[in-house]
Image (cartoon, rainbow, N blue to C red):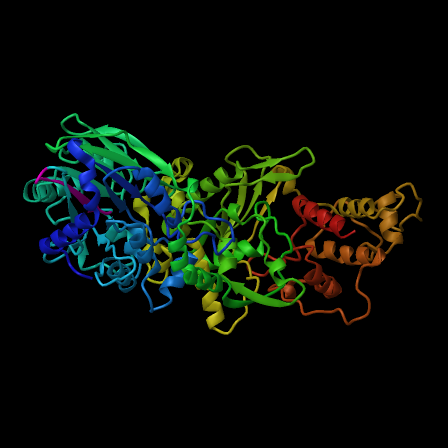
């Protein structure tokens, strides 16, 4: 990468001006028109189709040549600038960078389109510096034969920490010839990236650099402009018009690291057009320190911004109202499409490469929102593997409709690929860790519970936006009053206390939500670790799908199959109230439930059960006659005694045999893996094995079935639903 110097910047500017000067004489007495076009946040959209989905990409770089030609119209000159994040993670980019040969296709795109300058953004700085260097060198090298347009990498605030000199061009200067005059109209483009970039990039990637001058205590663009670049561009370079191309959002005029455009305008003069790189597509006008209206534009990853200057012979000018040209309105450029066709083919191959062999079983059609699923447990495993955190939080909204079981088809194994990672976890969020107390976690789960609804039939619906917590076992009773729905939070077998501290992994976007701040008070300033700063994930911009891919790859590299993980914790939703759901079920209530489920004629008369503590009860008579129960062996049924979990699964085994779906012989028998199997009675041994197969009662996160605990109403409701589903 060539470091900036004035001679190189001037030579590059002259080359650009000469390449565009031929039509100037046609402008006649009135001078000429200059159309300034910009794009931003294009996120590596270089192909006509998305390699992951096969869907058409409506607003890629392929559209820029036609859109730029239409937007420029009859203008004498055109200036085209991109304001960063071109290298956002994508399969096309991954395919391009996996090959060491050939010109970087993103550089091919910018040069083919005729860009003058590129301002690096946060994704660009987040990449491996050696990979970024290849891209930048391919942008600028002057011996690139087709196309011939070099593109300057422009960033005034990426500084060598010791010398305080910019490592890239701080600006470009282009001299446009005025027809009928020996004068030139001079336009400068100043590039500035996020001032807090050092905190956004992988540790060690840019330790020898700074993103503001050392005397810029407030880390503001305004300080950089006033003290370093205003005099240089306006006085030394003699710029008649200055474009500030900022990889930042507009903001509200206060000083914010990633939203400084409004602050810069309000506190300075001498800048004539501002391009905001972090902003959604739009145009607006803000007053500078002298009260002058300054246009602010952003392509937002979907449009060209169009600003036309009408320049007179005396170098005075007027500026048309800035507009947007949607890229989707134009056709793909055939020449550029041909140049990157091979990269797209490589991307298609890449997304189907195996990261690890996938082995079942997995749920066929998991309900990601309302019940715990193995696929979401897999994501939690990846988040906890990446961070070493105690617990993790994530909402599985984007995963709806995805099934790992369908990937297996009729076979027992398949390949887990990049495509699966993107399908399962398509979010472009990044991962962070923070410290939280047990109380803060509970308060946030309470917010999530508001995302669910219950119907009259006690069915649970909704759940969009609700976070699921891994690492802490909890239950929620949705009919409880607000704020008291989450109960029985346990961590590693012990109740969670209000002040107990946990390291929590979660998507960074949570920290910007108002409901999160209101419930927890945990802000972005409390972040301990950021995936974008971890060298393992920087190539993916720290995005969640890349973290999942690296986790799956680590499994494959160990020669293992990717199987459903053992849950680190459990969570369950109940439609009723906890006061009801946590009541203990009596033996009489349990056999009554089985009798009603059996489909038996409830009016049928069975012989009276020979017990002394309940006389001629039809449900007890049925249970005794069918062998569901034999009482306590001493002539008592004990109807009011709470039934234990062990007794319940014994009766379930007998019930399944009664209806012809129970085990026969001994070939079916399996090992009992429960950590507390020794706490059960010998007469329950077969029932425990049957429960291992059927899962009527689930062990807790510590692998304990708790056979002597009393069965609760909420557990009976789950068992009933399970039995009904199997009938």
Magenta part, dominant SS = strand
Residue 7 vertical position relative to residue 480 in the rendered view, above or below? below
Q: Dividing the picture into quarters, in which one does residue 261 lie?
A: top left
The residue range painted magenta reads 181-193
For the point 17% across and 34% down, which residue is it?
28
Farthest left residue in view: 236
Q: Position of residue 459 (x, y in %)?
A: 66, 39
Viewer-proximal residue among 355 and 350: 350
Residue 95 vertical position relative to residue 373 in the rendered view, above or below? below
For the point 20% across and 62% down, which residue is it?
1
Q: Position of residue 47 (x, y in %)?
A: 43, 53
Viewer-proximal residue among 45 and 725: 45
Residue 385 vertical position relative to residue 292 in the rendered view, above or below? below
User: Position of 422 compared to 693: left or right?
Assistant: left
Q: Position of residue 625 (x, y in %)?
A: 89, 53
Tell me if I can see residue 642 in this picture: no
Q: Dividing the picture into quarters, in which one does residue 330 lie?
A: top left
Membership of 184 in magenta stretch: yes
Tell me if I can see residue 408 in this picture: yes
Viewer-proximal residue among 364 and 434: 364
Farthest bottom residue in view: 559
Q: Position of residue 188 (x, y in %)?
A: 16, 43
Q: Dividing the picture into quarters, in which one does residue 323 lie?
A: top left
User: Position of 643 compared to 20: left or right?
Assistant: right
For the point 29% across and 51% down, which residue is it?
122
User: Position of 710 compared to 659: left or right?
Assistant: left
């Amino acid at each position: 990468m060539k470091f900036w110097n004035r001679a190189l910047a001037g030579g590059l500017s002259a080359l650009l001006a000469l390449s565009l000067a031929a039509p100037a004489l046609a402008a006649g007495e009135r001078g000429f028109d200059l159309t300034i076009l910009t794009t931003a946040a294009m996120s590596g959209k270089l192909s006509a189709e998305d390699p992951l989905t096969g869907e058409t990409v409506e607003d890629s770089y392929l559209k820029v040549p036609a859109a730029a030609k239409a937007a420029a119209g009859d203008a004498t000159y055109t200036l085209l600038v991109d304001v960063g994040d071109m290298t956002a993670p994508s399969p096309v980019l991954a395919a391009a960078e996996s090959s060491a040969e050939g010109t970087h296709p993103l550089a091919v795109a910018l040069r083919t389109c005729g860009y003058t300058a590129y301002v690096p953004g946060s994704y660009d700085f987040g990449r491996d510096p050696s990979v970024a260097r290849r891209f930048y060198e391919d942008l600028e090298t002057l011996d690139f034969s087709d196309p011939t347009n070099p593109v300057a990498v422009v960033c005034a605030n990426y500084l060598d920490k010791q010398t305080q000199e910019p490592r890239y061009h701080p600006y470009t200067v282009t001299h446009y010839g005025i027809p009928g005059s020996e004068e030139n109209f001079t336009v400068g483009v100043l590039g500035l990236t996020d001032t807090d970039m050092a905190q956004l990039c992988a540790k060690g990637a840019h330790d020898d650099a700074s993103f503001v001058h050392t005397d810029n205590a407030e880390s503001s663009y305004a300080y950089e402009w006033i003290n370093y670049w205003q005099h240089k561009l306006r006085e030394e370079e003699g710029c008649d018009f200055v474009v500030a191309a900022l990889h930042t959002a507009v903001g509200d005029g206060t000083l914010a690291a990633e939203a400084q455009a409004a602050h810069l305008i309000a506190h300075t003069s001498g800048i004539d057009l501002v391009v905001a790189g972090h902003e959604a597509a739009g145009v607006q006008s803000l007053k500078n320190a002298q009260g002058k209206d300054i246009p602010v534009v952003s392509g937002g990853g979907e449009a060209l911004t169009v600003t036309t200057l009408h320049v007179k012979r005396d170098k005075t000018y007027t500026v048309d109202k800035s507009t947007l040209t949607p890229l989707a309105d134009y056709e793909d450029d055939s020449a550029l499409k041909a140049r990157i066709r091979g990269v797209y083919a490589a991307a298609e191959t890449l997304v189907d490469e195996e990261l690890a062999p996938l082995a079942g079983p997995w749920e066929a059609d998991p309900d990601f929102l309302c019940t715990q699923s193995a696929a979401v447990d897999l994501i939690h495993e990846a988040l906890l593997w990446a961070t070493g955190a105690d617990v993790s939080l994530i909402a599985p909204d984007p995963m709806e409709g995805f099934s790992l079981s369908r990937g297996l088809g009729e076979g027992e194994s398949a390949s887990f690929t990049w495509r699966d990672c993107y399908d399962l976890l398509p979010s472009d969020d990044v991962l962070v860790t923070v410290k939280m107390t047990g109380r803060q976690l509970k308060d946030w789960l309470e917010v999530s519970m508001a995302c669910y609804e219950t119907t009259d039939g006690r069915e649970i619906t909704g759940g969009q936006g609700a976070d699921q917590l891994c690492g802490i076992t909890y239950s929620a009773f949705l009919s409880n009053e607000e704020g008291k729905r989450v109960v029985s939070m346990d961590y590693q077998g012990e109740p969670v206390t209000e002040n107990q501290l946990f390291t929590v992994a979660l998507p960074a976007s949570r920290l910007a939500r108002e409901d999160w701040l209101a419930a927890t008070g945990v802000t972005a300033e409390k972040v301990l670790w950021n995936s974008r700063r971890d060298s393992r994930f920087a190539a993916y911009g720290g995005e969640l799908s890349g973290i999942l891919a690296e986790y799956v790859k680590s499994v494959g590299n160990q020669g293992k199959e990717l199987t459903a993980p053992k849950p680190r914790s459990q969570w369950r939703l109940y439609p009723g109230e906890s006061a009801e759901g946590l009541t203990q079920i009596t033996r009489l209530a349990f056999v009554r439930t089985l009798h009603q489920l059996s489909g038996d004629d409830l009016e049928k008369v069975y012989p009276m059960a020979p017990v002394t503590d309940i006389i001629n009860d039809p449900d007890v008579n049925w249970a005794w006659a069918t062998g569901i129960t034999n009482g306590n062996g001493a002539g008592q049924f004990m109807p009011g005694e709470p039934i234990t979990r062990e007794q319940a699964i014994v009766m379930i085994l007998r019930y399944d045999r009664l209806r012809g779906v129970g085990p026969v012989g001994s070939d079916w028998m399996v090992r009992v893996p429960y950590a507390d199997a020794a706490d059960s009675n010998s007469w329950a041994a077969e029932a425990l094995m049957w429960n291992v197969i059927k899962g009527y009662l689930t062990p807790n996160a510590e692998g304990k079935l708790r056979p002597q605990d009393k069965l609760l109403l909420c557990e009976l409701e789950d068992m009933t639903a399970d039995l009904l589903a199997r009938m």
